[in-house]
Image (cartoon, rainbow, N blue to C red):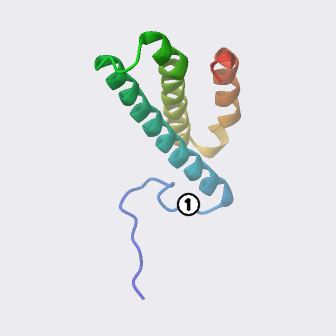
């Protein structure tokens, strides 16, 4: 029976406990969400560049999108930084509370 060998020393590559599995899922989901928001931004920019919709309609359809993309990028970076810390110093709740409190009106 072949043994899988990890390709890196990242503990999230082979999560052991439930906590690590949840963290891995959080990071995976956030990365996918940021990528989706960035694609939506590209679409918005293309609509603007080609004048397919007037600026009022674009603003109505994509209100807060640039701020939302920036918020989610910063949140993802924060999560990725926390993962590099020892488990006892990974305070995901503090990151979430701090960021949400400062940008509550985005959503």
Residue in view at x 65 percent, y 15 percent: 102
Residue labelled with disc 1: 15
At which x and y percent is residue 83? 54, 42
Query: Which quarter of the figure is the C terminus placed in?
Result: top right
Q: Is residue 8 visible?
A: yes
Question: Is residue 64 found left or right of 102 in the rendered image?
Answer: left
Where disc 1 sits, the SS reads loop
Dot 1 alpha-carbon crowd within 10 angstroms: few under 14, some 14 to 19, many 20 or more: some
Hey, which quadrant is residue 52 in on the image? top left
Please, which residue is most extreme toward the left here? Answer: 50
User: With respect to residue 84, does 105 lie above or below?
Assistant: above
Residue in view at x 71 percent, y 26 percent: 97
Residue in view at x 47 percent, y 33 percent: 37
Residue closest to the eye, 62 or 52: 52
Question: Is residue 99 found left or right of 36 in the rendered image?
Answer: right
Count of marks, rendered view: 1
At which x and y percent is residue 30? 53, 41
At which x and y percent is residue 62? 51, 22
Hey, which quadrant is residue 9 in on the image? bottom left
User: With respect to residue 63, does 15 lie above or below?
Assistant: below
Q: Is residue 63 visible?
A: no
Query: Which quarter of the figure is the N terminus placed in?
Result: bottom left
At which x and y percent is residue 6? 40, 65
Question: Is residue 97 found left or right of 65 in the rendered image?
Answer: right
Residue closest to the eye, 83 or 72: 72
Residue closest to the eye, 93 or 56: 56
User: With respect to residue 15, does 37 lie above or below?
Assistant: above
Residue in view at x 63 percent, y 22 percent: 99
């Amino acid at each position: 029976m072949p043994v899988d060998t990890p390709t890196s020393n990242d503990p999230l590559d082979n999560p052991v406990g439930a906590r690590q599995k949840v963290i891995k899922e959080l990071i995976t989901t956030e990365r996918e969400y940021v990528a989706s928001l960035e694609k939506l931004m590209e679409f918005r920019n293309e609509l603007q560049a080609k004048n397919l919709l007037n600026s009022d309609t674009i603003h109505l359809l994509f209100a807060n999108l640039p701020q939302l993309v920036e918020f989610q990028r910063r949140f993802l970076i924060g999560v990725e930084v926390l993962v590099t810390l020892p488990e006892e110093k990974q305070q995901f709740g503090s990151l979430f509370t701090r960021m949400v409190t400062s940008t509550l009106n985005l959503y």
